[in-house]
Amino acid sequence: MEHLSLKRKITIMIAIMAAMFFAAINQTIGSTAMPRIIAILDGMNLYTWTINIYLLTSTIATVLVGKLSDIYGRKPFLLAGILFFMVGAFLTGTSSDVYQFITYRGIQGIGAGIIMATSFTAIGDLFPPRERGKWTGLMTAVFGFSSVIGPTLGGYMIDNMDWHWVFWIFLPLGVVAFFMIIFLFPKVDRKKSESIDYLGSIFLTTSLVPLLLAFSWAGSEYKWVSPQILGLLAASIISAIIFIFVEKHAKSPVLPLSLFKNRIVTVSNIIGFLMNFGMMGALIYLSFFVQGVLEISPTYAGYVTMPMSIFMMITAAITGQKISKSGKYKRFAMLGVPIMIAGMAIMVFMTNVTMAVISMIIFGIGLGLGMPVFSLATQNAVSHKEIGVATASSQLFRNLGGTIGIAVMGSVMATSLKSNITDKMQSAAAHGVDMTKMDPNIAKQLAAFANPQTLMNKPLITETMAKLPADIQPLFTKMLDMIRDALSSTLSTVFLTGTLVLFLALALVFFLKEIPLRTSNSVPAAAADGEQAKAEGTDVGTKQVFASDSMN
């Protein structure tokens, strides 16, 4: 696609960013509204599934579409992704129970995975690595913008409108994005020499699904050493072994193992895994602090997280421009990851809204500096014919990091919260607040609020307070204060865990090899000697020499 005029490329990028924004805004708008929606559907015991199913299906879709889009081009998959997402969003809004909600969120996840993977890969089709930085930064800024308005809008809507509109309000934007892709995005002929690795796709799926389920259920549905979790992990390992054997003999593997011989790809993917492990695992639980501990409504909770998105958006756009101008990227990761660590470290000690906002600003700046680097480094380190599968591998490791991070942090939270609540209740009993001496029905009613998700449901708290006898109401207030105090201490442990994981990511950044960003997608086959290959952007350590493989 390098033969296209700059005007045509910009027009195509507008269409891609419209599709990206449609997926991103539908994801972020539900973040602050989700706890209330699941409470309305009476499915708080399945709350984590509403998040995990989305991550599960989007992860599978992302990695499978990577290779297929290298064969068939990006356009059909962008269109399919938008359709899946629109259907999923519409059906989610029609849910009458939590099981339907989870199923339809899974369909949304398929669409989101396809859109995210093909959107960033399409940048690689349109622009050489040296120019991708500014466009990757702008795409990150689009996601940042959706993160600015999404949570606040979602909080306002759940407080003032029927919850169904959270999923329906942006459907017209999906229609616009769909037709923009149809008319503006050029079609690329299928590479006839490429075959589809069906067997590899099956075993890759059967490797990932049990793994993601194991980490989604461990610590919440089942114990970490339970037969169910150990069985899922065993199934994942067996499938992974078969997958490796299949890929070694596949003519056109869905996830080439040779990709991971490239040191830049491997290090970038591991860093992406660790960053998302720490980031997603901790940020998912920030809403518990804002709404559960500080008692802030969903509408205003969005304002607390908004600074992170604003500063990420601005910093990512500037970082992308700087990377394109200098051709260097490692320095931004070296600066960004420590700033992320500083922002998360503040979360460990935060006790009020001001500290929460400051932590969000600092964390957002770090994200903006670091986020565009690793996918760009990965794309630059492989030949253009592998750009789709390389980008998909980056998305795969990030999604795995997020899923496993949420699970591990959830276990840390559950263990720590149980201990902290026990300590608080023992302290309360010593001061005359002993639930064992209450009416059993009332005690059972109050005990439900030891669950942090129930603690976030302010309408339920108000309703419960109104139904309690007058002499019990002061005890209920004291109990809520104690649980909030226990939750605050617990979340400090969660955020500390995220901080430590980010330190591991920082250590690996030092091992990220930096090679000059190429100025063309087509690399001459004659560039075989080490110095010329290095100048063209080849990782000499992997002894790869890119052959000319223009997408024209």
Image: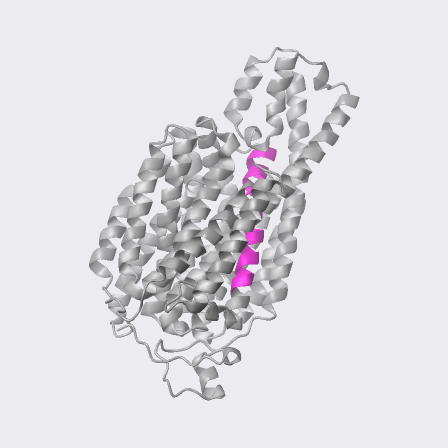
Q: From the image, which quarter does the N terminus lie in?
A: bottom left
The colour scheme used here is one colour
Q: Is residue 215 visible?
A: no
**Image vertical order of residue 337 relative to residue 97, above or below:** below
**Image vertical order of residue 211 relative to residue 10, above or below:** above
Q: From the image, which quarter does the C terminus lie in?
A: bottom left
* Residue sitting at x 37%, y 38%: 104
Position of 186 with respect to 156 (left or right) is: left
Q: Was residue 284 drawn as part of the magenta stretch in this picture?
A: yes
Please provide percent x and percent y for residue 504.
63, 60
From which residue to which does the magenta span run? 269-293
Q: Is residue 319 visible?
A: yes
Please provide percent x and percent y for residue 203.
44, 55
Question: Which SS type dominates the magenta stretch?
Answer: helix
Please provide percent x and percent y for residue 540.
50, 81
Of all residues, the one furthest to the left in this rendering is: 183
Q: Was residue 228 drawn as part of the magenta stretch in this picture?
A: no
Position of 250 with respect to 190 (left or right) is: right
Please provide percent x and percent y for residue 159.
43, 30
Closer to the camera in the image, 334 or 191 = 191
* Residue sitting at x 47%, y 26%: 42
Closer to the camera in the image, 136 or 86 = 86
Quadrant of the rendered image containing residue 158? top left
Position of 440 with respect to 116 (left or right) is: right
Closer to the camera in the image, 148 or 464 = 464
Quadrant of the rendered image containing residue 296? top right
**Image vertical order of residue 392 relative to residue 468, above or below:** below
Of all residues, the one furthest to the right in this rendering is: 430
* Residue sitting at x 42%, y 39%: 30
